[in-house]
Image: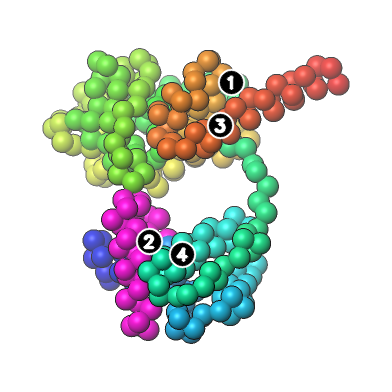
Amino acid sequence: MKESNDYWKSNLEDEATKAIMDEYLLSLKLENKAERTIRNYRWFLERFFSICTLPLNQLTTNEVRKCFLHFTNGKKEKTVDAYLTALSSFLQFCLAEEYIENVIIKKRWRPKIPKSLPKYLSENEFARVKITTENSALRDRALMLFLFSSGCRSSEVSNLSIKDVNLEKRTAEVTGKGKKIRKVHFSEECALVLKDYIHTRICKESDPLFLSNSDQRIGPKSIYYITRKIGKKAGLNQSLHPHCCRHTFATNMLARGATIEFIADELGHSNLNTTRIYARILTEDMITSYQNIMG
């Protein structure tokens, strides 16, 4: 099994393609792309080029298209789009480095994906979840309040240590995508519950903020499990997961008058268009309310 720090090295048998792919994956690492993204790209590219075995300089549009359709047969449109993004990124790198001479992937290959709105909790659902957390373990309550009032991703919460959190100022320094550090805020209620939770432990500043049941740093999967469990206890019709908490945070902030720019900073969005989708949620909610009243 490969060491963690070698996640950007491929396992291809063809040495020539492997060398180029390793160069490409290393370039992603040097650009501070998330490790998860690099691993996903590597996984797809390794499997694609185990099917498409022509040397890179002999690739044609027709051959790549045929192999790509074979590989993505039966896959959902979002999955096809993600695979196409990885393949397109790699082949653009090959073109820029002159490993290939022509553009291979065509824009028309991109599947049309209907724009879906982020799933978030209504005021009633949010209130039910908060009531449920009041009867939950102190760690779980602190965790849920932090997710809802900071808008952080589960991976960002998992990586937090006690030293990263200022309970008096109600701020935390989190490491987001591309290893970018940003400051987020959380509620007074969250600060009080966090303080109580930390006081139940014998810990150092360098210790993880949230611990698993085995007293290790809590992982994203465990955070997902906790949110899902609380959502079920609250009787939600939809599954509650960390990103739903994040969407609920953003929607609530916008509804209360926060600017798109402020919300983008809190969420760690580098592109404002990513944040503007929450404005669409409020607009569509208002249309629905109008239709319910006026018919």
Examine the rendered structure and indicate whether residue 58 appears above or below residue 84.
below
Name the N-terminal-most of marks 1 and 2. 2
Magenta stretch: residue 263 in it?
no
Q: Estimate the x, y position of residue 87 in percent, counting from the top left.
A: 49, 66
Mark linked to residue 276: 3
In this view, the mark in front (1 or 2): 2
Q: Quadrant of residue 104?
A: bottom right
The crowding category of the residue bearing disc 3, from other C-alpha atoms within 10 Å (few below 14, some 14 to 19, many at least 20), is some
In the image, 23 versus 295, the foreground residue is 23
Residue at horizontal 42 percent and vertical 61 percent from the top: 40
Mark 4 and 2 residues: CB-CB less than 8 Å, in contact? no
Q: What is the magenta range?
A: 14-40
In this view, the mark in front (4 or 3): 4
Q: Secondary structure at mark 1?
A: helix
- The amino acid sitting under disc 4 is Gln
Q: Give the colour scheme of this rendering.
A: rainbow
From the image, which quarter does the C terminus lie in?
top right
Q: What distance separates the C-alpha of mark 4 from that of mark 2?
A: 18 Å
Q: Quadrant of residue 143?
A: top left
In this view, the mark in front (4 or 1): 4
Give the left or right position of residue 5, taking residue 92 as reference.
left
Pointer 1 residue: 123
Q: What distance separates the C-alpha of mark 4 from that of mark 1?
A: 46 Å
Mark linked to residue 99: none
Pointer 2 residue: 39
Name the N-terminal-most of marks 3 and 2. 2
In this view, the mark in front (1 or 3): 3
- The amino acid sitting under disc 3 is Arg
